[in-house]
Image: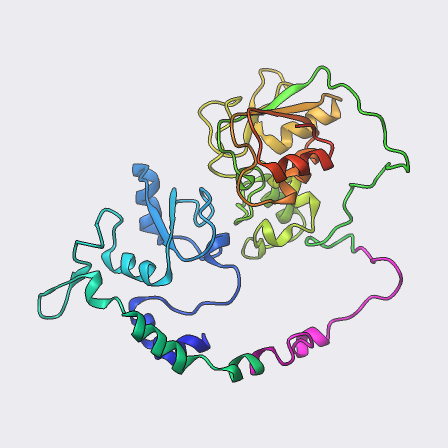
Amino acid sequence: ADYYDRAGLTPYLDKLGFNLVGYGCTTCIGNSGPLPEEVSKAVNEADLAVTSVLSGNRNFEGRINPDVKMNYLASPPLVVAYAIAGSMKVDITKDALGIDQDGNPVHLADIWPSEKEVEEVVASAIGQEMFNTSYADVFAGDAQWQALPIPTGNTFDWDPESTYVRKPPYFEGMTMDPAPVQDVTGARVLAKLGDSVTTDHISPAGAIKADTPAGKYLTEHGVERRDFNSYGSRRGNHEVMIRGTFANIRLRNQVAPGTEGGYTRDFTQEGAPVSFIYDASQNYQAAGIPLVILAGKEYGSGSSRDWAAKGTALLGVKAVIAESYERIHRSNLIAMSSSP
């Protein structure tokens, strides 16, 4: 924000609708808020393939906004340029972005700064004193941070009422000597997936919807809808993260054809009804039935997200059978005893 202020860009960005709304994870984690109601309604009723253009570092399907199917990553100036154009169908290297007050077409070349202009603005707007001021007491924290109560003792004092940090079950029943590897027999397929299933499909980090198992869990524990936050912010609570595994709104599970999202069929119930993946996995585990995942090529691509393997294991998945795996995710599956 200081960069923009000192460069004199803030008032112009405000006029274009690029307002400062916060610091930290916003757009890239799905925290930029819903689309206008009439826009969201039109998108869903007409099944429109709408896009976003952002300068963040994530373009996973359904991550920026559940109504937005495609996301393009671009530099900040190009984000502004596409916003002015209002469409991805234009060729911004040739077509006009808009019309000025005198009726003349305005092209990207007309507003794109030269390298010399950029260097001059950077030299005038960024100085060493900015970093000295901002980072001098970065480890001390503000008054609120310093006022936080600090627990004492040699071990962490788990709060059973916390919806953010809970004692995880990974070490329950663990012995000094590892248990021998056992064959997987009598398993059921929890999900049959296609190619290029990313870790964000497996363990989404975006917003939590109210009608999902994770949303229902938070509601039952007294959390208001406005305070749900994101899966990424609640990764210290395994109860939320298990319920969020395979809950990506764009997941297509061939076990439950015609659905989109975290659904499967529960063969422990009469008629094998369509069910949330989490709910079905609980029934399978209660019945002592191991689970497997089937997938195509490039399974686990994208971010090396540890919860994609943790959540898979906690759902009772004993093996993931795919044509190929992303290297780090494959290692994480092995570490969590879900054999790839």
* Residue at 65 percent of width and 43 percent of height: 307
- Left or right, 242 with reference to 64: right
Magenta region, residue range: 133-158
**Magenta stretch holds residue 327:** no
Give residue 6's position: percent from left, percent from top: 40, 81
Residue at coordinates 65% horizontally, 19% vertically from top-left? 188
Tell me: residue 339, above or below residue 9: above
Q: Quadrant of residue 283?
A: top right
Specify whether residue 142 is painted magenta: yes
Side of 212 relative to 137 (left or right): left
Magenta stretch, main secondary structure class: loop
Residue 174 location (% of width, % of height): 86, 37
Identify whether 45 is placed above or below 229: above
Residue 187 image-quadrant placement: top right
Q: Residue furthest left?
A: 103
Q: Position of residue 38 (x, y in %)?
A: 31, 50
Q: Position of residue 316 (x, y in %)?
A: 70, 29
Nearest the viewer among 10 and 48 is: 10
Q: Which image quarter is the C terminus in?
A: top right
Image quarter hosting the N terminus: bottom left
Residue lying furthest front: 116
Residue drawn at the location 47% of the way across and 47% of the way down: 63
> Looking at the image, which is closer to me, 199 or 217?
199
